[in-house]
Image (cartoon, rainbow, N blue to C red):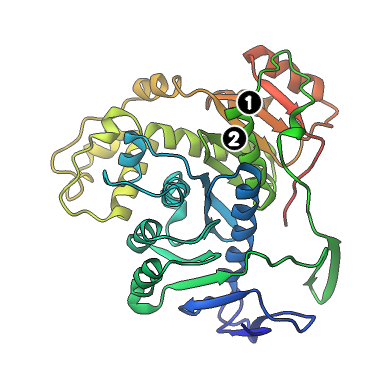
Amino acid sequence: MANELSLKYGCNPNQKPSRIFMQNGSELPITVLSGKPGYINFLDAFNSWQLVKELKEATGLPAAASFKHVSPAGAALGLPLTDVLRKIYFIGDGELSPLACAYARARGADRMSSYGDWAALSDVCDGDTARLLAREVSDGVIAPGYTEEALGILREKRKGNYNVVQIDPDYRPEPVEHKDVFGITFEQGRNELTIDGSLFGNLPTRCKELPPEAQRDLILSLITLKYTQSNSVCYVKDGQAIGIGAGQQSRIHCTRLAGNKADIWWLRQHEKVLNLPFVEGIRRADRDNAIDVYISEDSMDVLADGSWEGIFQVRPEPLTREEKQAWLAQLSGVALGSDAFFPFGDNIERARRSGVAYIAQPGGSIRDDHVIETCDKYGIAMAFTGIRLFHH
């Protein structure tokens, strides 16, 4: 380890010089085991590591995150994969470690956004997880350690240039943090709020049922939001984020963005999508793009123009609007977290369309009564946490 590491450039090639270093002169808590991570790589690495470390501490389960541009595209816990999830995440039938399941879920929730991701792992990277990383288009990974098998696999990726970073799991930053903007130094206390089930005691809605699984998913959503650029909203189901909306100026736009991602995740499990007749050997990225177009557009128009040729063996049957609506109506039991209060009930209306049954948000809007009324209209349980989770 060293107390300084020179980088090729900053956010953009013209931003030189660039380095990371410890102002107090102590050693950096990381070791680069392979590759040459850049400025944005390290921003993703340090944000994503905090997220998975906190998830592991809060739930006791292995956790993984897939980051792009300093916000998570996915975050998940190491729960077993169903046969359907294995299929939509392009995972075979073999056994997977809990950590590998966590990364498969984190990477698979929004595969288009995760293309070229930075991965974070809460536990020592094993061979199963390394094999998943090796086959994806990814910039790098951070973990508290690597087995000999895993390190051997990852050092062969991208002709030895894949970025592999090991972080000291015992590292604790100073309680006060600084950053410079326009030559001016900002100082603040670190956001060290503990996120756990104790935040869900205040339920102003008529429905006050928060099963253990819902509480786990709400914890996952809030910890994810803690490291997502604001405004942010996160939809979670069965131990994984299924829709993350980041960096929106309007909360309703954020809720729509994340909800649309959750809808696509669910539509990918429709029988017609699962059975799309792809040509043999098509690249994963091309398959992801084709699925996204098939789901997101009017597939009858897309297929009519011949764009399916070279992707599908035969022209697939369209997925109609009516079929989409019927399938989306079956999505239920989704948990949703918001990093700040919902100012209007329109956010609840949109969330309900994506199967949301449980909500955690700070509360404190002058229209809280309308938000509560909208939740009661649909039988949604909502907790006022009293904590805001802006991240900039």
Q: In this view, does 22 lie above or below 207?
A: below
- As drawn, the label of residue 217 is 2
Element type where label 1 sits in the image? strand
Q: Which residue sits at x=20%, y=35%?
A: 316
> Is 269 placed left or right of 344 in the picture?
left
Q: How far apart are marks 2 and 1 (CA)?
A: 9 Å
**x and y, in percent, of residue 306 in the image:** 20, 43
**Can residue 297 be seen by looking at this rendering?**
no
Specify whether 224 is left or right of 151.
right
Image quadrant containing the N terminus: bottom right
From the top left corner, tell me how far across and down residue 117 is, in percent.
47, 60
Q: Is residue 181 visible?
A: yes
Front-most of residues 177 and 347? 177
Could you tell whether 344 is left or right of 266 in the image?
right
**106 vs 40, nearest the viewer:** 106
SS label for mark 2: helix
Q: Is residue 18 left or right of residue 105?
A: right
Residue at 36% from the left image edge and 67% from the top image edge: 149
Compared with residue 376, is residue 66 higher up or lower down, i.e. above or below? Answer: below
Q: Residue 358 carries which label?
A: 1
Residue type highlighted by circle 1: Tyr
Q: Work out which quarter of the rendered image holds the C terminus and state it.
A: bottom right
Q: How crowded is mark 1: few (under 14 residues within 10 Å), some or many (20 or more)?
A: many
The disc at residue 159 is: none
Indicate the position of residue 353 as horizontal and vertical percent values: 54, 24
Asked if marks 2 and 1 touch (Cβ < 8 Å), the reply is: yes
Please provide percent x and percent y for residue 136: 36, 59
Q: Which label's residue is closer to the chain start, 2 or 1?
A: 2
Q: How crowded is mark 2: few (under 14 residues within 10 Å), some or many (20 or more)?
A: many
Of residues 258 and 47, which is closer to you in this image? 47
Amino acid marked by disc 2: Asp
